[in-house]
Image (cartoon, rainbow, N blue to C red):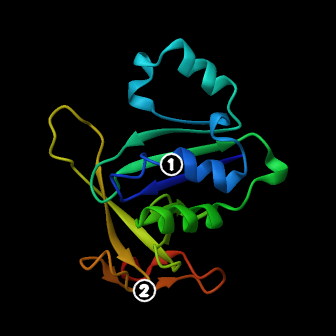
């Protein structure tokens, strides 16, 4: 089972192992959290830890409003909690915004969890990052379907899709 997430807080990787251990109810030594960009520097012990982990998160740095991509893998599908519960927990524990994709919708549409336990929808915009060594775009949270204190510059507009409460941003129709 995997959960894809992104967070705005640059501090999130510090302490993520303990939060995932508690959330998934596994011992900390069975949780692997490392930066994927540094995998060529991982020691043999780190590779062994990855192989014996029940929960792993090889996180990656992002640009723009999103600080980190958190692909979280859990081997026990029968006991895997929902991505919504996990996002709410990470948002609260780290006082950050946690985003996860809306299933079956366009790739720019995400669910957003706040540190206060609120959920809404967010649309991501991609912009050139302005860094010559990188082809990766900077992602900006440009629109939300309700006000979010941490995003004062985001447009607040409804998303059109009465069936699931999310869909095409109203401004795009």
Q: Residue at x 70, y 26 (%)?
A: 52
Vertical side of 3 occupied by 82: above or below: below
Which quadrant of the structure image shows residue 55? top right
Examine the rendered structure and indicate whether residue 139 appears above or below residue 89.
above
Residue shown at 67% from the left, 35% from the top: 30
Q: Are marks 2 and 1 in contact (CB under 8 Å)?
A: no
> Residue, x 80% and y 47% (percent of image)?
77
Relative vertical location of residue 2 with respect to residue 98 in this rendering, above or below: above
In percent of width and height, residue 105 lies at 57, 64
Spot the residue most to the top: 44
In the image, residue 39 lies at what x, y percent? 45, 23
Q: Which residue is mark 2?
A: 146
128 in relation to 135, above or below: below
Q: Indicate the position of residue 98 as horizontal and vertical percent values.
A: 47, 63
Q: Which residue is mark 1?
A: 16
Quadrant placement of the C terminus: bottom left
How dense is the environment of label 1, judged by Cα within 10 Å: few (below 14), some, or many (20 and up)? many
Question: What is the secondary structure assignment of the residue under circle 2?
Answer: loop
Q: Nearer the viewer, residue 164 or 30?
A: 30
Q: Is residue 71 visible?
A: yes
Q: Residue at x 49, y 58 (%)?
A: 107
* Of pointers 2 and 1, the one earlier in the residue sequence: 1
Q: Report crowding for label 2: few under 14, some 14 to 19, many 20 or more residues within 10 A (C-alpha).
A: some
């Amino acid at each position: 089972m995997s959960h894809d997430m992104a967070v705005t807080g640059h501090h999130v990787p510090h302490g993520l192992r303990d939060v995932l251990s508690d959330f998934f109810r596994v011992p900390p030594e069975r949780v692997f959290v490392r930066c994927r960009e540094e995998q060529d520097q991982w020691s043999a012990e780190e590779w062994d830890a990855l192989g014996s982990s029940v929960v792993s998160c090889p996180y990656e740095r992002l640009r723009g409003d999103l600080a980190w991509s958190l692909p979280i893998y859990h081997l026990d599908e029968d006991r895997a909690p929902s991505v919504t519960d996990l996002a709410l927990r990470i948002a609260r524990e780290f006082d950050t915004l946690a985003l996860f994709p809306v299933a079956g919708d366009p790739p720019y549409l995400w669910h957003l969890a706040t540190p206060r336990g609120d959920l809404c929808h967010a649309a991501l915009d991609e912009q050139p990052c302005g860094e010559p060594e990188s082809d990766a775009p900077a992602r900006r949270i440009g629109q939300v379907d309700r006000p979010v204190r941490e995003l004062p510059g985001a447009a607040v507009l409804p998303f059109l899709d009465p069936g699931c409460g999310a869909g095409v941003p109203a401004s795009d129709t």
